[in-house]
Image: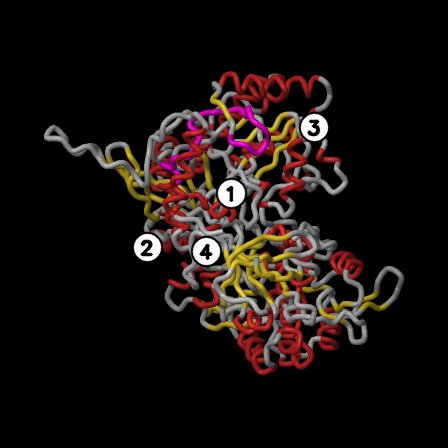
Amino acid sequence: MAIARRAFLAGLGGAAAGLGLGRLSHLFPLPSPLTTPAWSPGAEKAVASTCMLCPARCGIVGRVVDGSLVRIDGNPLHPVSRGGLCPKGRAGIQLLYHPARLTGPVERVGPPGSDEFRLVSWDDALARVSSALSSLRDEGRAGTVGVLAGHTTGLMGELLDRFERVYGCARLEREDYDDGGGQVMAHTLGRAVAPSFDFERSDLVLSFGAALSESWWSPPQSARARDVDRGPRWLQVDTRLSRTAVASDEFFPLRPGSFGALALAIAYVMLKEGLYDDVFVGHHVSHFEDWKDGAGETRPGYRSLILRHGSPEGISGVTGLPVERIVQLAKTFGRAERPVAVWDQAASWREGGMADALAIHALNVLRGRIGRAGGVFAEPRLPVPGLTDAPPEEAGPRAPWPAPDGDTDKLELLFLYASNPVASRPKPERVMKTLAGVPLVVSFSPFLDETARHAHLVLPEHTYLERWQDAPAPRTVPYPVWGVVQPIVPPLHDTRSTGDVLLDLASRVGGDVAAALSGASMEELVRERGEHLASVRRGGTFVREFRRDELSELEARGWWLPHGQSPGAFWASTSETGGWFDPHIEEAGPLNLSQRRDGRVALFPPEARGPIEQALPGRVLGVLPRPGSGTAEEEGAQDGDGTLLLNPYRVMTMTSGGTALMPWLLERVGVLNGEGWEAWVEINPRTGEELGVASGQMVRVASDHGSFVARLRYFRGAQPGVVNAPYGLHSAVTGWGALDAANPLAAAGDRRDPASGLPDWYSTRVRVEPV
């Protein structure tokens, strides 16, 4: 499955030429400048913006020479990234000048999945879409229109929501890699908001598999905390030797599927040794002690269950960690002044994953780290008016797509925004079959990716380096940050901002849709939001570090320094520096944070335990097998049948569907093992010897759900009995347009945790066989 660099570039160039979309206007990274005797250097400028290649939303500064973007650097004024920029951000220049970009709107003239498209005008394309929208609404079939979107926040996310609600679209799920944080907060605080983490004021961060230095929500947030004076210690509990584990102060290798078990053992030691905040727990926590249910029956509380089942001696065999290391870890966390525990999809995307996430977050509750410096806060809200007429939780649930029962498959028009489900879903055949049944599929992809090739129309969007948008900081950042996305260079091709296209379509449809989404462009909407921030009497535009600390200290004392600028001048300053922020984190007690009836923070309340116990009978808190229940299983070890546990993971350079297009990133995908240009899987050398497979050979990894092909690599950082499989490399290996043979999600399947509805990618057993 390897592909040569020359063949990769030639193939992309040939594909673009074959489309009849015009000659290639740019090569990598830029054409050589023409230097004649009459040549003189032109204007040079630096433009601040925000990177949109992953959820981190780092600040960037583009260097533009003679009208061409020649370099992308980190913005030192951005309060989260502070000048840092990962390889993806720097490689954005290759996305802008990529030869396979669509030069204008196209319609498919060949079979689904082919590269047979022809150029059409924007007027013809928009007329076709708006006519379909108007007809479906007039006929009372607005619910047969759906929008499938990837991770989308800020104005663009609100604009999609607004369009869905006003038009009456079917509400399809968002491809957002939800880690269950909102459900955890709903169970503990009665608020369905994501948790944010105050790393900078913590003195100990305990990560349960969270890829803090790689593909977490905000890697710069964790990197910045490590850079400050007397920053926190970082302890990484993980199932593989990841880049984050290597960068941590101490690494605790754990068997897959045992994150929650370890959290209960840590709680056991803390309870036994009195290393928890008994005042906080006594005054502000419910369901810690035994209680009586509505029928008058006594139910065991969190303390009783932990002390009965969570001893390190019993859990050591489940986790693979020696008892001494479990006790050491628990005492370290319990004795820290401001510790915080964090997780991500590696813990929550499995059967029982919600129980694991609740068990991990319970450590924060035991230490009283809710709403306190260095602890866990509710996701901050930006002080700006929204476009939507109702908060998301009041808009009704979103339906899975494609739906198991087929209800949401009966669409007549489907929009795809920042979404490539043929590549990102575990069942690509099913996605393609569903797409084939939709009369009109419209993609906004700038490229003919795997899914765009199944669309009837592709209305290519500007890259983030050419368009207006906004970029709120990730939900894990504990204070509000609003980044500006603005054109660093003018659009290179006949592309358009998807936000402007939606506004245009709304105007063409007319009626209440036009009234709700008319009279503005994305540039105007971003500017209006920026000018509004001039009046909020808090925070300010991005500033140097000394001024950031000064702002934070003043606001902590109840002061705010007026900027003395008109809204227009304030907006000019905001766009010049890259955005607005408010560094002050308002500490709040449970009475201010909890929206539960009793005003307390709950530990595994009945509404959480019920679905977990129903889905996982015979387990303690949904985590530990009860003695004699017959459910004990060492999930990280072979069961004697030759199968391994599949462990999919994301690498830093491939966290976004479009980044596989960038040769700079493909050159070195695997940071620890030096892999590049092709998909691979990792197994422990001992496991490889037992299976009779050698490092370097091609293997097929197969489960009951599907299979994929990749190159096998021995890796001592892999657990015995486990196969680690990075995902996101499909386009680099097989090329767009082919059914992907290198997608690990094909083997992971499309199962979901019945208690949470989150994907179950980490419970799949597979066979590894030579090809």
Amino acid found under the numbered disc labelled 2? Phe
Q: Position of residue 175 (x, y in %)?
A: 59, 43
Which is nearer the eye, 698 or 544? Answer: 698
Q: What whole-number distance in Å separates the C-alpha atoms at marks 4 and 2?
A: 23 Å
Q: How is the image coloured?
A: secondary structure
| Sooner in the amino-acid sequence: mark 4 or mark 1 | 4
Determine the secondary structure under disc 1.
loop
Q: Report the residue at 70% width, 51% height from top.
A: 757
Residue tagged 4 = 219
Q: What whole-number distance in Å separates the C-alpha atoms at marks 3 and 1?
A: 33 Å
Amino acid found under the numbered disc labelled 3? Thr
Q: Report the residue at 69% width, 42% height from top.
A: 400
Q: Position of residue 771 (x, y in %)?
A: 57, 57
Q: Does the magenta portion include 103?
A: yes
Which is nearer the eye, 597 or 382? Answer: 382
Residue 546 numbered tag: 2
Q: Report the residue at 66% width, 61% height from top.
A: 765
Determine the secondary structure under disc 3.
helix
Question: Is the residue marked by circle 3 packed among few (<14), some (14-19), or many (20+) residues within 10 Å?
Answer: many
Residue 382 numbered tag: 1
In the rendered structure, the answer to whether residue 68 lies left or right of residue 710 reads left
Kindly indicate whether the residue at mark 3 contacts the one at mark 2 (C-beta within 8 angstroms).
no
Q: Report the residue at 61% width, 71% height from top.
A: 277
Q: What whole-number distance in Å separates the C-alpha atoms at marks 4 and 3?
A: 39 Å
Snapshot quadrant of residue 375: bottom right
Residue tagged 3 = 144
Q: Which residues are magenta?
A: 95-115
Snapshot quadrant of residue 21: top left
Q: Position of residue 96 (x, y in %)?
A: 38, 37
